[in-house]
Amino acid sequence: MIGKNFKISPQSVLEYKNTLFVVKASDLDKEVYSVLENASKQGKCLFVSTSKSYQSVRENAKNYDIVIPNLFIVDCVSADAKVENHGNLRNIYFAGGLSALTNLSILLSQYVESLSGSHGCIIFDTLHTLLTQNDSKMVIKFVSQTMSYLSVYQNLKSAVFMIKDADNNFLNQIYNFFDKVIER
């Protein structure tokens, strides 16, 4: 499904260690899922969804050629979700809501440890959504610590998405935490 309709080259996520993509809201889903499609073909991929439940992510994934066994989803939206309430879920993890940054950090660390030296990728769908439940200073600190932590691992790349019209002050404060910023 990767084609000329996408403004961001999906391979871009694999060119740099930590990449921030700043895109129009209307293009967000297709940009995120095209990068996710490419990354899932390269190895394990952790998709951190701060805007949609895991059910929505799975539905959207059906429209792309995503390697499902390589896809792990962290659902930050379904705060009260319990695995036993959703049947037999494989590769789905619940952070406990948008304000659970500590839980999210723990899940990221567990994913990195599970790679055991193999290649992997972490993709955040909409970083700015964390601002709805957290103070901007807390989110900036979370981004700084997360990017510093991830940069240590040579086998791991990350792609973080922000909506272009999101809080410019916040965006200006996190630019420096990334190796590459791609603005469309």
Image (cartoon, rainbow, N blue to C red):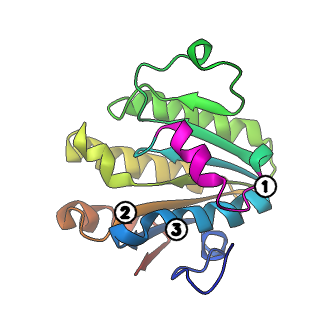
Quadrant of residue 23 within the rendered picture: bottom left
For residue 177, above or below residue 138:
below
- Give me the C-alpha separation between circle 3 and circle 2: 13 Å
Locate the N terminus and report the quarter of the image it occupies: bottom right
Under circle 3, the secondary element is: helix
Q: Residue at x 70, y 58 (%)?
A: 154
Name the side, left or right, on which 94 lies relative to 184.
Answer: right
**Residue underneath mark 1:** 43
10 Å neighbourhood of mark 2: few (<14), some, or many (≥20)? Answer: many
Q: Residue at x 42, y 44 (%)?
A: 50
Name the side, left or right, on which 143 lies relative to 3.
Answer: left
| Labelled pair 3, 2 in contact (Cβ < 8 Å) | no
For residue 52, above or below residue 77:
below
In percent of width and height, residue 53 lies at: 48, 38
- In magenta, the rendered stretch is 53-67
Question: Which badge, 1 or 3, comes first in the chain's sequence?
Answer: 3
Question: Which badge, 3 or 2, comes first in the chain's sequence?
Answer: 3
Query: 75 or 138: which is nearer to us?
Result: 75
Q: Nearer the viewer, mark 3 or mark 2?
A: 3
- Give me the C-alpha separation between circle 1 and circle 2: 24 Å
Question: What's under tag 1, amino acid-wise?
Answer: Gly
**Residue underneath mark 2:** 162
Question: Which badge, 1 or 2, comes first in the chain's sequence?
Answer: 1
Under circle 2, the secondary element is: strand
Under circle 1, the secondary element is: loop
Quadrant of residue 99 within the rendered picture: top left
Number of the label disc, if any, that sits on residue 158: none
Quadrant of residue 158 within the rendered picture: bottom right
Locate the C terminus and report the quarter of the image it occupies: bottom left
